[in-house]
């Protein structure tokens, strides 16, 4: 094992010769998955805007349905534009298989509907994206699935709660919005020993900064609406897993239960966005570090949540599983809730908006916006404080972002 914790987690594992010969991340983000069958030699892949595919003969159609012959049937089951994107993403994340769907929530629900049944139990972290929390609470529980929240910052909590009824262990790391980090290796080991699947929402990191499967997770989810698309112009979700799990997620969860199919146009836009993912993530990370430093130095700010700060209580754990610290920063103002709203209204360049991972710096107030599905009591219990402000550092020049944040801080 490498002692350099700054290295990518995938670099610190024993390497097969296959991995050693692997091309760099940006090269793979540009070239991997490219379908070379285009008769005109188009450099950029055409977009297959088609719902169905014609068969040469009735026998061919039957053979495809029976799985005796490859080839496309209908775009809810697969489409060449989505397939290219899926091969690329599987390569980038180091997963056997990938499925792209219509939104991050489409990815989460497609996975859960595939693997849970009434009477099952799932164990989920305390801090979750607001709609994920709402789905567990108002969706799954209604269908007889027991959902229990566990503070996964301490793996011993999971070890105590897990049982043979536990189907899935689910968490985000870093968690939205308070940046709590979960130890993917430790949690995966405990879950595996108990026969439960580990599902990680890695949206904040992208495959460039963190690879949960290499650390022991079974399934990785991304909201591609965020950094993967990267330009704030689409909604999409990604699921990565073994080929065996994906067979069920694709042909049961997606095909028959959620139907959350991605549009080929959006798949094309994500493939386009991925070509610059490495460049963009480096800039997002640089800008977030500068934003975190500025906030930490301000006397108007009581606490900054950014895993890259040495003062962050899980900084060492973050370094052990993330190659850099991402583009998200959260913080609390001395004046609490009201100061937070005043700060947002004082911004001139940065936009007041939910979502993240766009070129524009976006600022929001989780308690009244993204995390309003929680009750105030739940927010307090799960560490989403009323004064918390969340920043998605954009791709603008750092000096301009910092100047805007500084003038808005001066107004609170
Ligand atoms: C946005 C987000 C989601 C949901 O994704 P959509 O594409 O909006 O459906 C899930 N998890 C995290 C961490 C997110 O930020």
Image: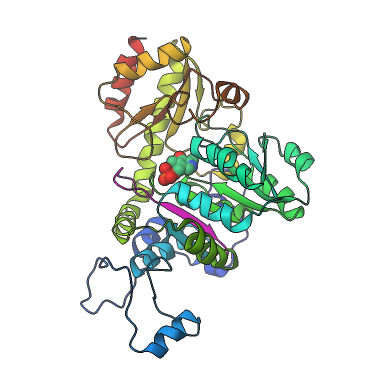
Q: Position of residue 369 (x, y in %)?
A: 42, 27
Specify the segment rendered in magenta: 228-242
- Look at the picture and state if 2 lies above or below 78: above
Location of residue 397 by image quarter: top left
> Percent from the top left, x then y, of residue 78?
41, 68
Q: Position of residue 95 (x, y in %)?
A: 53, 61
Give the prevailing secondary structure in the magenta stretch.
loop
Left or right of residue 362, residue 302 in this image: right
User: What is the total number of numbered labels drawn onto the structure image?
Assistant: 0
Q: Front-most of 249 and 47?
A: 249
Relative height, residue 19 to residue 211 (above, below): below
* Quadrant the C terminus occupies: top left
Q: Within the magenta stretch, is there residue 238?
A: yes
* Residue 282 visible from this viewpoint: yes
Q: Nearer the viewer, residue 215 or 73?
A: 73
Reply above or below: 219 against 39: above
Q: Residue at x 58, y 58 (%)?
A: 114
Picture residue at 45% right of the left edge, 29% below the top: 329
């Amino acid at each position: 094992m490498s002692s350099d914790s700054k290295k990518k987690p995938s670099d610190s594992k024993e390497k097969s010769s296959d991995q050693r010969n692997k091309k760099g991340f940006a090269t793979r983000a540009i070239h991997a998955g490219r379908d070379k069958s285009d008769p005109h030699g188009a450099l950029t892949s055409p977009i297959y805007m088609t719902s169905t595919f014609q068969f040469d003969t009735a026998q061919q159609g039957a053979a495809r349905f029976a799985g005796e012959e490859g080839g496309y049937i209908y775009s809810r089951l697969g489409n060449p534009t989505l397939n290219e994107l899926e091969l690329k993403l599987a390569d980038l994340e180091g997963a056997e298989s990938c499925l792209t769907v219509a939104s991050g929530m489409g990815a989460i629900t497609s996975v859960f509907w595939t693997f849970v049944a009434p009477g099952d139990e799932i164990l989920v972290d305390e801090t979750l994206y607001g709609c994920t929390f709402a789905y567990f609470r108002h969706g799954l529980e209604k269908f007889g699935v027991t959902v229990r929240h566990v503070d996964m910052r301490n793996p011993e909590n999971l070890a105590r709660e897990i049982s043979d009824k536990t189907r899935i262990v689910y968490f985000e790391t870093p968690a939205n919005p308070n940046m709590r980090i979960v130890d993917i290796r430790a949690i995966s080991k405990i879950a595996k020993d108990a026969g439960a699947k580990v599902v990680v929402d890695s949206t904040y990191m992208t495959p460039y900064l963190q690879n949960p499967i290499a650390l022991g997770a079974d399934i990785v989810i991304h909201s591609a609406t965020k950094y993967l698309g990267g330009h704030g112009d689409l909604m999409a979700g990604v699921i990565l897993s073994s080929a065996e799990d994906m067979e069920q997620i694709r042909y049961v969860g997606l095909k028959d239960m959620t139907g959350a199919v991605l549009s080929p146009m959006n798949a094309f836009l994500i493939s386009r966005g991925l070509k610059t993912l490495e460049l963009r993530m480096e800039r997002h990370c640089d800008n977030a570090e500068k934003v975190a430093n500025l906030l930490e130095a301000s006397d108007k700010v009581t606490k900054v949540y950014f895993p890259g700060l040495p003062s962050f209580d899980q900084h060492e754990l973050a370094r052990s599983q993330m190659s850099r610290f991402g583009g998200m920063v959260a913080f609390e103002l001395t004046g609490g809730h009201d100061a937070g709203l005043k700060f947002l209204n004082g911004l001139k360049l940065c936009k007041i908006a939910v979502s993240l991972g766009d070129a524009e710096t976006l600022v929001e107030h989780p308690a009244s916006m993204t995390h309003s599905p929680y009750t105030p009591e739940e927010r307090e219990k799960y560490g989403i404080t009323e004064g918390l402000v969340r920043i998605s550092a954009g791709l603008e020049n750092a000096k301009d972002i910092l100047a805007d944040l500084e003038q808005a801080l001066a107004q609170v």
